[in-house]
Image (cartoon, rainbow, N blue to C red):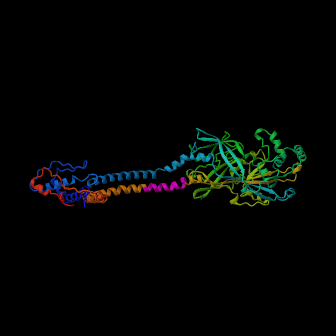
Amino acid sequence: MIIKRKGIQHTLRTILALLQYMVNKKRMSTTCPNATLTASNNSVTSKPPVPCVGANVYACKTCTETLILLSNISPTTGPIGDIQICSQNRLAVIIIGIVTLILGIILSSIPWVDYFILQNLRLWNDSLSFHYWQRPGVIRLTKVYIYNVTNPDGFLSGEKPKLQEVGPFVYREDMEKVNVKFYDNYTVSYQHKKILQFVPELSIDKNTPIVTPNIPLLTLTSLSPKLGYLLSKAISAVLTLAELKPFVNVTADQLAFGYDDTLVSLAHRFYPKHLRPMSQMGLLIGRNGTLTEVSSIKTGHADMNEFGYIDRLNGIDHLPYWNQKPCTSISASEGSFFPPRERTKADMVYLYDKDLCRVIPLKYQEAVEKDGIDADLFNLAEDSYGDSQNNPDNECFDTKDYAPVKGLQNISPCQFGAPVYISNPHFYAADTSLLDAVEGLKPNKSLHETFFKIQPKIGVPLEGKVRIQLNLRVTRAPNVFPVKDFRDFVFPIMWMEEGISELTPAIRRWIYLATVFAPNIVPIISYLMIVSGAFAIIFTFVRVYQTFVFACDPTLEILEMGRRSLRRGSSFIAHHQHKFMHRESYTLLRTMPSTLGGDDREDVLPIISNNNNSDS
């Protein structure tokens, strides 16, 4: 069998070099001070050896032989090269460990996640929060429930009104903000554009007939006692000739979005412009299309404590319907964003709705969870509507002709002077006298309470429902014949629920990543980086310490690297046997250094040799 010279020569030279180096390493360090091994281009150079004298002859001879044997070991693939590569690898591990450790410490000590969230939460062009705010994309539903009076004649005869709740009539509200403008004082102005679309699959028939009080007529007659006897009689004659009745028969859709009424048409034609009502009578008629009201809110760049709160309405910084604070305050959210409670630590947030004619307070109740996301539950305080005796802040809502009642709020200044009052649906949390005066109402906290679930880190509502009831406060007008039997009464007309139940999957994923995933995974990654970086550094130094302190020399490591070299040589032979087609003679040590004497030449003999005439 013919063996290729390169493979066997490399392997045997490595074995011999390792053995002789291990045996004579001490002699090399003590008797051959001028011998230097330098790996450069696969060669070894040595300084001229000192003359061998006396006892040093054998040591120098052995030292020289070892240098000659090592001269043919590759510095990149043999033990010496392996030592260099190993040192480089250790240096790389130390550098990587230090970098990982530093990054881990930085990530764990700097709240960069909160900084990233804050940058994208503040309102500015093309931020994530801007796209959510400008066109939310959430399914916002308005549910309308109307009270049908089943005994109108009996009521005029002195009976309690018997009310039947009819509904829901569900409308999907497509909303966006238009005419958006940013200002240097960190505010942004806009107008609401709302389109209400009837959702038949969630509703009953919108053409369901309803018997309800004649709101325009009762509004006029409730003002008649202030006009004097003669003017009241004149109004009575006109209304009698027009054959107007205290109750009207309309459909649910007409009551919500408009029907023709003689009195409303006259008021629309002759009233001053700033008091002029719509051309038709409808409780929700002004909610479709682009609203005339121009609002501006705070973007959060100046102060996150008022993030999302209204700055001005139609250019003024207060509500013009009331005379003093806090009733004139507009410092409240329009429902898209609230100041993050994690920053403000406040237990109260405020909401403004144009239909409510005021700011309503929402009080913190408890921490809850919505779709795996932490939230704070806020609800409307039970003393928010009503008399100042129960809530002194309500004193500024009282008017001269208003008898304060718990749970009932006057909003007539926003309703063209009509005696419209708001309350919770079914008079929930209101004075019991209001509930006792009617039949058919059943207050229920879970169905009739206003609440919001707000994410505390970013102030985005995950769920929210504003539930409000519209009531007509009728004042008896004995001098007006069509309504002479209509006594003083707070008559429930309808109630509605506005809000969202679920966020879109895209918005929910964004909130989950920002408030749940990132705050939990970032500390884990930071601590893992710190531990892994420290471990890499300590492990490397321990290995170096063991090698150079306990072993005193790299012999064991050289031996291990020699074994790897042997394995590479054996693999080379095994994979190239089929290419060996001829025989060659070789000698392990080809040349003899000229500096060796005659006696020394006898010691430097070939370990393996072949004659040209012998078989391998």
Is 391 contained in the magenta span? no
Q: Position of residue 265 (x, y in %)?
A: 82, 43
Left or right of 81 in this view: 246: right
Q: Position of residue 344 (x, y in %)?
A: 57, 50
On-image quarter of the N terminus: bottom left
- Regarding residue 240, the answer to whether it shows in the image is yes
Relative to 516, residue 295 above or below: above
Q: Tell me which corner region of the image, top left, top right, bottom left or bottom right, holds residue 191.
A: top right
Could you tell me which residue is drawn at 52 percent across and 55 percent down? 517
- Regarding residue 357, the answer to whether it shows in the image is no
Most prominent secondary structure in the magenta stretch?
Answer: helix
Is 521 contained in the magenta span? yes
Q: Position of residue 295 (x, y in %)?
A: 66, 42
Q: Tell me which corner region of the image, top left, top right, bottom left or bottom right, holds residue 59.
A: bottom left
Nearest the eye: 467 or 505:
505
Relative to 16, residue 116 above or below: above
Q: Position of residue 563 (x, y in %)?
A: 28, 60
Left or right of 321 in this view: 572: left
Nearest the eye: 611 or 352:
611
**Magenta highlight range:** 513-528
In the rendered picture of this protein, how many numbered marks are placed on residues?
0
Left or right of 172 in this view: 232: right
Nearest the eye: 443 or 71:
71
Left or right of 614 in this view: 249: right
On-image quarter of the C terminus: bottom left
